[in-house]
Image (cartoon, coloured by chain):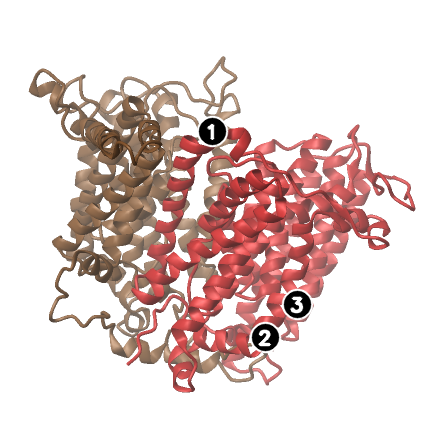
Amino acid sequence: MSTAVETPSSAPMSTDLRRVAVVSAKSAIAYTAVTAAMALLLLLVPRDGDVRYRMGAEGDAVRLPDVALPGMAVAWVCVAIAALVSVAAWALLRVQRKPSVWLGILLGVVLLVAFLSWSGAGSQQDLPVTRLVGGAVLLSVPILFGALGGVIGERAGVVNIAIESQLLLGAFAAAITGSLTDSPVAGLVAAIVAGMLVAVVLGVFTITYKVDQVIVGVVLNVLVVGLTSFFYSEVLVPNAERLNDTERFKPIAIPVLSDVPIFGPALFRQSLLVYLAYLAVPVVWFALYRTRWGLRLRAVGEHPQAADTVGIKVELTRYRALLIAGGVVGLGGAFYTVVSVSSFGKEMTAGAGFIALAAVIFGKWDPVRAAMAALLFGFAANLKDMLSLVGAPVPSQFMLMLPYVVTLFAVAGLVGKSRAPAADGEPYIKE
Amino acid sequence: MSVDDSQLGGTSVAAPQHVGDEPPVRPAGTKAPDDGDRWREALRRVTSGGWAVSLGAVVLAVLAGSVMIAVTDKGVQDASGYFFSRPQDTFSAIGSAVGGAYAALFRGAVWDFRADDFAGGIKPFMSSLNFATPLIGAGLGVALAFRAGLFNIGGRGQMLVAAAAAGWVGFGVDLPIVLHLVVAMTAGIAAGAIWSGIAGLLKAATGAHEVITTIMLNYVAFYLISYMLATPGLLQAPGSSNPKTPPMADTVIMPRLLGAQYKLNLGFVFALVAVVLVWWLLNRSRLGFAFRAVGENPDAARVAGIDVRRTTVSVMLVAGGLIGLAGTTQVLGTVTTGFSSDIDAGIGFDAITVALLGRSTPFGVLAAAILFGAFKAGGSVMQASENVPIEIVLVIQSLIVLFIAAPPLVRAVFHLPQPGARPKKRARRQPKEVAA
């Protein structure tokens, strides 16, 4: 179904439009449901004491004071705001309008603050806001690169289930090269090459041999897990010092920007790869939507026949898109072995590629939205560390589960039916 | 992609939610399953391989495995140091490394030629069948979803909840002998079906993509089970602090089929029954016809009066039930001494490869599952006796599927004749290409 069907319009009421209203009530229902759930949590499990937000970080030019607030009160205020947002969503629904993305983001943020305040109430530990944001950005880096690569590939009409394998092989290559050369930059380059290598295999099978893209993707994942684990046991473990001990990227503080309170240390005292991620999102967006290359790529993904008719080389365009996408994903793989830790481990990507795939669909095949989705997953992954720090009153497993539940709700309630590029997954056979 | 969709949604820039004033062209309550066709071709592409191609694929994969074994073997590396003075040493080292590894694989998977009698010799094959048991059920679940154009990556979560439900009944409830097994299996299969049904329901009700929802449900299930395993009174064994359940009650354990020396248990029979049932369902029943119709062409199915949404939910329920069977036989047949959160053992993901190799047909899945079971059984013997990491099995398995999926490649490598009826690039159904 096209998204147009779900979009309300200002045309006069008709039978069709009333149905449209029913469809778009999903957001309002979802808003109300999560707000009610939060309120219920506060009612059933009240917690005493203050929550202390630590606003500063080491090395700040201007050190903000820590903030201590009564946890429950803050939480209730946030729930009240969330309730207002829900009411607003219903009100918008009455006039046939869909709540904007910002309303959703506002709801998410206030509910998050409510949850944090409730969890941190009465805790001996401070909640470091800087690490809350900075850690989220850091952890989202591989997912973000994976999602960007996925978006490029799918906009060109090639479904890339193999993101996981590109990340893993990227991490593997970065580990070996980085260890041999003692240079993280060399590791980064090797990771790009590794991602491209997987892309070439994907391309040969799906574009040249017209094998189903899902099959090749799934199989490549297994293949790369097998290859990297095999060579890890046979080669890396016996020569760990020479082949599996990388020099990591050091965090670089950007002058001025890194001194901005709270967000400065979080966003601008990161390593090179994180800054590359900041750059990659607008660059990919620009390349896809504002360049001739991007227009042709999208044309090939939506309607390869039409593209072919006007003289665009479909297969070549797809190969090129896959190669670039592979390089982008490979960069994400480098995160594991030259940013996060300094050695490779078996299956160390642990499903991040699948999360990236989810981010692609969640972000509706748009680089910026996909990056936001990746950030959400990174935030969720980081949140559990933060909550275990303050000793949250919920079993840790539920904390770990939270991001995935949120995604389920978000996909079902807010995103709904996502529309893939029309020729996504279709091999092109010239007539 | 239907013609309707290409008319409605253009290449929207940045925001796909372009405000369209055009009225919806479809009657209420219908959805164009545009993402369905992405996966729908999944099995069809693997078909039309033929025996020669399959054999060629296996040969190529085994060759690739041999190269990996040879390159990493210590003896080969030493001998290649003086390759130009005594090349035969290198070749004999390669021969012994590769030969030894594959001999061990065979010995662990099919026939133990070191055993004294037939009973001992056939033991590895029984072990392979035992490894194949959960792969059959889970492979069927994935294959069935493929047939209906759905991609079920949720095998892991479905197996976990099924194992938890069956296991809880298995150790926590006192029932007489046969009834206990029946109740435990019902609980496990139902749990798997419900878990997968959530994804089906979300897809039918809101259009949420099953790839996302099943992946997310995997994680939710994993952490839910981890919590239950760490909480006394739920799944954790009393008086223990390990995240592990108590052993299953004697009344619920699936009996071994051929005596205590073989691990093969009643679960294998249930898996075989499931194969026949799925075959019947797909090829002889009204529901299965609806599944296939929706998988082939959802628009046509809808026009023909099939409720696509309801079919989506039904498919996921049945698929989850089959994967639930796999989780159930794991805890009641194979790992009866109590399980932890790794009980799924990657089977949920292996099942995807099994379904692909089996071309999403019930008997194809059976054959593929037995092949993969043999690889698993043989791989562990190979690792133990020849020090070749078991992961090489993954490489060989995935290469086999990859090569079988690309017959022209295999034919080119072995100079096999291209089939006359088929053009060099296999032609796809033309109308679809036009519509897309």
Residue A289, disc = 2
Q: In terms of sequence position, does the residue under pointer 3 or pointer 1 come before the other? A: 3
Q: In terms of sequence position, does the residue under pointer 1 or pointer 2 come before the other? A: 1
Q: Is residue A156 visible?
A: yes
Q: Nearer the viewer, mark 3 or mark 1?
A: 1
Q: From this viewpoint, which residue is outermost toward the top?
A: B239
What is the quadrant of the N terminus of chain A in the image? bottom left
**Chain containing the residue with disc 2:** A
**The chain coloured brown in the image:** B
Give the colour of chain A.
Answer: red
Amino acid at pointer 1: Val
Residue A304, disc = none
Query: Looking at the image, which residue is at 24% across and 70% down?
Result: B425
Which residue in the structure is indicated by mark 1?
Answer: A237
Query: Looking at the image, which residue is at 14% across and 57% down?
Result: B50
Asked whether, in this view, residue A145 is left or right of residue A162, the answer is right
- Whole-Å distance between the Cαs marked 2 and 3? 26 Å
Which residue in the structure is indicated by mark 3?
Answer: A99
**Chain containing the residue with disc 1:** A
Find residue A428 and report its image quarter: bottom left
Q: Is residue B153 visible?
A: no
Query: Looking at the image, which residue is at 25% across and 39% down?
Result: B372
Q: Are marks 3 and 1 in contact (CB under 8 Å)?
A: no
Amino acid at pointer 3: Pro
Question: Does A214 appear above or below B341?
Answer: below
Q: Nearer the viewer, mark 2 or mark 3?
A: 2
